[in-house]
Amino acid sequence: MAYEKADQRVRYTKMVIKNSLLELMKEHPISKVTVTDICKKANINRNTFYSHYTNQFELLSIIEDELYEEIRQVVEHTMNLEASGKLSYEICKYIKANSNICEVLFSENGDKELLERILYISHDINIEKWMKEVKYFDQKLFDKWYTFTAYGSIAIIKKWVNSGMKESPSKIAAFIDKATEAVSKDFY
């Protein structure tokens, strides 16, 4: 019983610390946020912070890795269902449902490469799929196509997130899928 209470306190403290960093990053890049700023915002002392994290950069990395892992699971689940046509929708739906964290991490103050990392999750899965479906599979051409479509998708998602996600996830996903399909037809 005492262990459960201690575990709950630790989870709560970590959540408050993470939320404080995200709030601060709405206004400042990580390079301008200090541990002292986070502690003030979270209403904790520095020893509490350092008992969980080395510095603000490690904290941000953990937040990003958690988001990445959750989206990776969404991607793998969707791809395992042979529902790759729904993949863009599932990713956009997840982003919308987690808008508080995504708005910060995909903003100018966030990591510029996080969304790229996320969209490359399905790269290898798509290679396997295309090798089975396409008679003459060209790896170099596929990589160029994937890079082109991934970066286009990144731009659309960033614009959507940074403009307040006014459009529905299904509308954004439909646009991404239509644009990707149009480019795909010319190559395969």
Image (cartoon, helix red, strand yellow):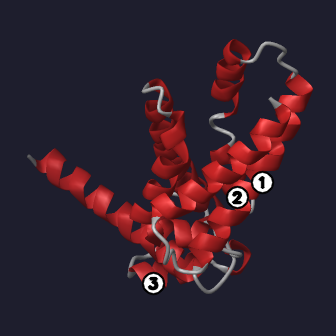
Q: Residue at x 46, y 76 (%)?
A: 20
Mark 3: give few (<14), some (14-19) or many (20+) Cα within 10 Å.
some
Report if the CB atoms under discs 1 and 2 are less than 8 Å apart.
Answer: yes
Mark 2 secondary-structure assignment: helix
Q: According to the image, label 3 marks what residue?
A: 41
Q: Amino acid at mark 1?
A: Tyr
Question: Considering the image in quadrants, where does the C terminus appear?
Answer: top right
Q: Residue at x 44, y 64 (%)?
A: 96
The image shows residue 171 at horizontal and vertical percentages of: 51, 63
Query: Which disc is residue 154 wearing?
Result: 2
Q: According to the image, label 1 marks what residue?
A: 151
Mark 3 secondary-structure assignment: helix
Q: Residue at x 38, y 82 (%)?
A: 43
Mark 2: give few (<14), some (14-19) or many (20+) Cα within 10 Å.
some
The image shows residue 163 at horizontal and vertical percentages of: 59, 80
Q: Nearer the viewer, mark 3 or mark 2?
A: 2
For the residues labelled 1 and 2, the Cα–Cα distance comes to 5 Å
Q: Amino acid at mark 3?
A: Lys
Q: Residue at x 29, y 63 (%)?
A: 12
For the residues labelled 3 and 1, the Cα–Cα distance comes to 35 Å
The image shows residue 47 at horizontal and vertical percentages of: 46, 68
